[in-house]
Image (cartoon, rainbow, N blue to C red):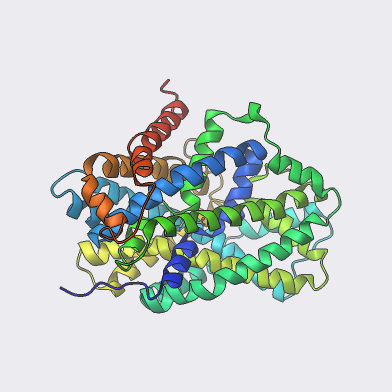
């Protein structure tokens, strides 16, 4: 049998998984969700969801991927032959494709802001003007679509250059740089006038704000942020070497991801209160607050250019993993060449990206269930497909998989200790599925 590709080194593999996890979800989506759902209240629920449930689903996915050495559909075919469980794999492939559609639009925005920074055009006289500039850019017919195309092409070529050369190398260099610049921005943001009010909003929980809707959003955001519930980590783990300590890797990835999200909050919310912006303004939040911060810094254009380059790269290492889920599936299950599989995914993703982009302009009146196409895809994937996918992944690993096989895989055939194995089994079998089910049922109004 042909030897499967693996990540080269332990660091490279952690970086690639972190690269998938850390992205627009942390820096764009997290502050936007936290702002819309009460700041501190959201943060508390989020940290619980990501550190407990996100981590459990991630480890379950790591198990599925490395034990089966398959893509997200193949994993279920190998571990539960001739059963319906493979539907979970299909849910993942479809979710990956749908997320790809709206993710490429926001990734395209980062390229525009990079371009505007370098040409010195990212300036405005007031918050209103920044908001207006952003609105007129995103509602344009051509410009955002051009950036979607550029971004999709870059993704396409990185995916084609393969696991080691493309994904691993890009993640290893860029992720630490992103971390450093985030810390610099935090310091800068905290020095703004009235920054304390923002910190209070972000860290001071008002428990009366916690509703089932807030919990579902936090759960969805947690899964989106650490890339679980849809087979992305199954696909990546299928490239893990057999000697990798998977429990430790899951802890590292989830912790780093959470830190980055919190750093993003510490940058955005002090700026929000300082500039008098509404924290609940949605997807525009980051693209209005950050240029404002940069404008007030010495060498602002340079900082903003570096920042948007890194954000674009963080987006790239995440979108690559979405692309890889669908490409690996077509390549392995339909026996297509990698080239053909990747071309189909890129072309389909581009078409979806165009529709999502236009939903800020000419298609803004097209609403399904009261949401634009962009918002609908975001809601359906993050708030439904990922939590439900995550729940069934837990049920599968907790109830269907033989515990001896599970333990052998997670301890590398007994060569490493996993002291919390029984805690993990308890969480994956009872706690995670029950909590996720209750949140979904409550939110759907079934009780
Ligand atoms: N985790 C990525 C982010 O936070 O930006 C988004 C993402 C990537 C979600 C891959 C799901 C996925 F499979």
In what quadrant of the picture does the N terminus appear? bottom left
In what quadrant of the picture does the C terminus appear? top left
- Residue 378 visible in the snapshot: no
Q: Residue at x 61, y 42 (%)?
A: 43
Q: Is residue 27 left or right of residue 131?
A: left
Q: Residue at x 66, y 43 (%)?
A: 35
Decide: is 195 above or below 395.
below
Residue 124 or 167: which is nearer the viewer?
A: 167
Q: Quadrant of residue 165?
A: bottom left
Q: Is residue 283 left or right of residue 320?
A: right
Residue 59 or 303: which is nearer the viewer?
A: 59
Decide: is 107 above or below 251.
below
- Residue 33 visible in the snapshot: yes
The percent position of residue 50, horizontal first and vertical second, equals 50, 46
Decide: is 350 above or below 376.
below
Q: Residue at x 75, y 72 (%)?
A: 301
The extreme left residue here reads 82
The percent position of residue 310, horizontal first and vertical second, equals 60, 69
Q: Is residue 364 left or right of residue 248?
A: right
The extreme right residue here reads 193
């Amino acid at each position: 049998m042909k030897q499967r590709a693996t990540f080269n080194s332990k660091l490279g593999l952690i970086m690639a998984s972190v690269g998938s996890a850390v992205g627009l979800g942390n820096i764009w989506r997290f502050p936007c969700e936290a702002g819309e759902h009460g700041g501190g209240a959201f943060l508390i629920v989020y940290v619980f969801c990501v550190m407990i449930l996100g981590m459990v689903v991630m480890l379950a996915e790591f198990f599925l991927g490395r034990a089966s050495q398959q893509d997200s559909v193949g994993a279920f075919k190998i571990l539960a032959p001739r059963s319906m469980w493979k539907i979970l794999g299909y849910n993942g492939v479809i979710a990956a494709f749908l997320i790809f559609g709206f993710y490429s639009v926001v990734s395209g925005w980062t390229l525009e802001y990079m371009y505007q920074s370098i040409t010195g055009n990212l300036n405005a006289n007031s918050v209103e003007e920044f908001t207006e500039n952003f609105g007129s850019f995103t509602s344009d017919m051509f410009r955002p679509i051009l950036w979607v195309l550029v971004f999709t092409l870059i993704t396409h070529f990185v995916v084609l250059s393969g696991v080691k050369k493309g994904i691993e190398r890009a993640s290893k260099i860029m992720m630490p740089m992103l971390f450093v610049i985030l810390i610099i921005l935090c310091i800068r943001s905290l020095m703004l006038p009235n920054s304390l009010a923002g910190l209070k909003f972000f860290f001071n929980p008002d428990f009366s704000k916690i509703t089932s809707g807030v919990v579902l959003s936090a759960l969805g955001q947690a899964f989106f942020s650490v890339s679980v519930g849809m087979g992305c980590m199954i696909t990546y783990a299928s490239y893990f070497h057999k000697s990798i300590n998977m429990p430790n890797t899951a802890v590292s990835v989830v912790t780093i991801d959470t830190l980055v999200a919190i750093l993003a909050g510490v940058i955005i919310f002090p700026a929000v209160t300082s500039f008098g912006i509404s924290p609940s303004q949605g997807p525009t939040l980051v693209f209005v607050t950050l240029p404002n911060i940069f404008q007030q810094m010495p060498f602002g254009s340079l900082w903003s250019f570096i920042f948007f380059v890194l954000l674009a790269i963080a987006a790239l290492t995440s979108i690559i993993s979405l692309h890889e889920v669908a490409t690996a599936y077509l390549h392995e299950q339909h026996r297509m060449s990698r080239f053909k599989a990747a071309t189909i995914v890129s072309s389909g993703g581009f078409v979806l990206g165009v529709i999502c982009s236009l939903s800020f302009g000419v298609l803004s009146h097209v609403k399904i269930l009261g949401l634009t196409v962009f918002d609908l895809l975001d809601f359906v994937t993050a708030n439904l497909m990922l939590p439900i996918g995550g729940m069934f992944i837990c049920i599968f690993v907790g109830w269907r998989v033989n515990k001896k096989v599970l333990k052998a895989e997670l301890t590398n055939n007994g060569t490493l200790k996993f002291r919390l194995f029984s805690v993990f089994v308890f969480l994956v079998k009872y706690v995670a599925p029950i909590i996720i089910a209750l949140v979904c049922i409550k939110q759907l109004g079934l009780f």
